[in-house]
Image: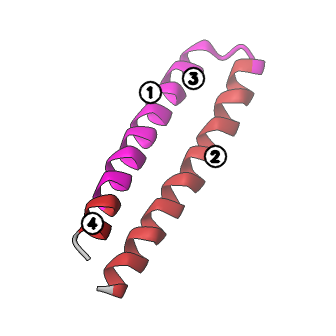
């Protein structure tokens, strides 16, 4: 059970790291006026944020089952 929780925390940390990287890439693309690149990065960022939300729901359900 603890291993599942550790894996879940690691997954959330990885998603947060990826989101941070995408936000930095998006900022650079916007500052460089790379419109298509910025749009693609916004889509990727949105998907990562959605994954993070889904993962948080799973963690909450796991905690509630304890």
Q: Does 53 sit left or right of 17 as displayed?
A: left
Q: Residue at x 39, y 36 (%)?
A: 47
Specify the label residue 43 is tagged with: 1
Q: Residue at x 50, y 35 (%)?
A: 45
Q: Earlier in the sequence, mark 3 or mark 1?
A: 3
The magenta region covers 31-58
Report, in whole angstroms, how far the alpha carbon at label 1 lies from the one at label 4: 32 Å
Specify the label residue 2 is tagged with: none
Report, in whole angstroms, how far the alpha carbon at label 4 lies from the one at label 3: 41 Å
Query: In x, y percent, where is residue 24?
Result: 70, 38
Can residue 12 be found in the magenta stretch? Answer: no
Judged by depth in the image, the label closer to the viewer, 4 or 3, is: 4
Judged by depth in the image, the label closer to the viewer, 3 or 2, is: 2
Report, in whole angstroms, how far the alpha carbon at label 2 lies from the one at label 1: 14 Å
Can residue 47 be found in the magenta stretch? Answer: yes
Q: Earlier in the sequence, mark 4 or mark 2?
A: 2
Numbered disc 1: secondary structure: helix
Question: Between 45 and 57, which is closer to the camera in this rendering?
Answer: 57
The residue that label 2 is drawn on is 21
Question: Between 49 and 18, which is closer to the camera in this rendering?
Answer: 49
Judged by depth in the image, the label closer to the viewer, 4 or 2, is: 4
The residue that label 4 is drawn on is 64
Are there few (<14), some (14-19), or many (20+) residues within 10 Å of tag 2? few
Query: Quarter of the image containing the C terminus?
Result: bottom left
Report, in whole angstroms, how far the alpha carbon at label 3 lies from the one at label 2: 14 Å
Specify the label residue 37 is tagged with: 3
Q: Residue at x 38, y 54 (%)?
A: 56
Say which quarter of the image contains residue 50: top left
Query: Quarter of the image containing the N terminus?
Result: bottom left
């Amino acid at each position: 059970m603890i291993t599942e929780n550790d894996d879940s925390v690691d997954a959330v940390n990885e998603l947060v790291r990826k989101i941070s990287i995408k936000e930095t890439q998006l900022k650079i693309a916007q500052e460089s006026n790379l419109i298509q690149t910025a749009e693609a990065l916004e889509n990727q960022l949105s998907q990562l944020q959605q994954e993070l939300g889904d993962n948080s729901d799973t963690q909450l359900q796991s905690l509630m089952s304890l």
